[in-house]
Amino acid sequence: MNEFKMELNCTKKVQIIIGKCIKTGQLFGMRAEEFSPEIWSVTWAFPIKDKIAKNEGYDNTKISGFFNFTDTYPGCPHCGAKGSVLCRCGKTTCFDNDTTIGKCAWCNNQFNVAYNRLTMDVGSDR
Ligand SMILES: [Zn+2]
Ligand SMILES: [Zn+2]
């Protein structure tokens, strides 16, 4: 039984999601852990350079499911915004909790943040 549990811990999936800051246009990475299938907790955010994101293949990461931002999530490392939303274009943008209408930093599309906030479906496969 113990061995089985250890194996589960070892295979816990961690993914880096790339977002773009709406205020500065700079990239940042978000660390998401899969707690149970399709349930992800976003625990951390950090600034990242375009080049590194590309080299590591982070910009191609495709994961899907429900996303929570933990209490310890520090917010966007560039502007401090506490959340992120996924745009229809498939990319993620930081946003402020104070606003309900967000704008995508990648494609300039406007969207309603209130709906998107808790269920962020990152990269649905087509
Ligand atoms: Zn930001
Ligand atoms: Zn977009």
Image (spheres, grey):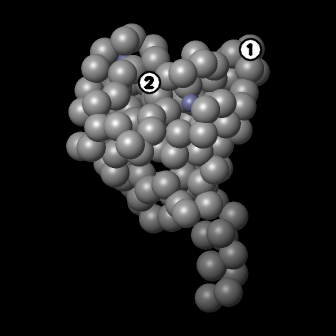
Where's residue 50, x and y in %?
69, 16
Q: Is mark 2 within 8 Å of ligand 2?
A: yes
Residue 125 image point, x, y percent: 34, 30
Callout 1–callout 2 Cβ contact below 8 Å: no
Residue drawn 45% across and 35% down? 95
Image position, residue 38 (x, y; %):
39, 54
**Quadrant placement of the C terminus:** top left
Residue at 62% of width from left, 88% of height from top? 1
Residue at image x 28%, y 20%?
110
Mark 1–mark 2 distance (CA, rounded to whole Å): 17 Å
SS label for mark 2: loop
Foreground: 97 or 4?
A: 97
**Front-most of residues 124 and 120:** 120
Residue 90 is situated, as x and y percent measured from the top left of the image, at 38, 24
The local crowd at label 1, few if under 14, some if 14 to 19, many if 20 or more residues have their Cα within 10 Å, is few
Residue type at tag 1: Lys
Residue that carries the numbered disc 1 in the rendered image: 51
- Residue depicted at x 59% and y 54%: 73
Q: Which kind of residue does numbered mark 2 sit on?
A: Lys
Q: Which mark is residue 91?
A: 2
Q: Residues within 10 Å of mark 2 (few under 14, many from 20)?
A: some
Res. 10 image quadrant: bottom right
Dot 1 falls on a residue whose secondary structure is: helix
Q: Residue furthest front?
A: 98
Residue extending furthest top? 107
Give the mark count.
Answer: 2
Front-lying residue, 80 or 120: 80
- Indicate left or right for 9 with 99 as reference: right
Which of the 4 quarters of the picture holds residue 53? top right
Q: From the viewer's perspective, is 45 left or right of 107?
A: right
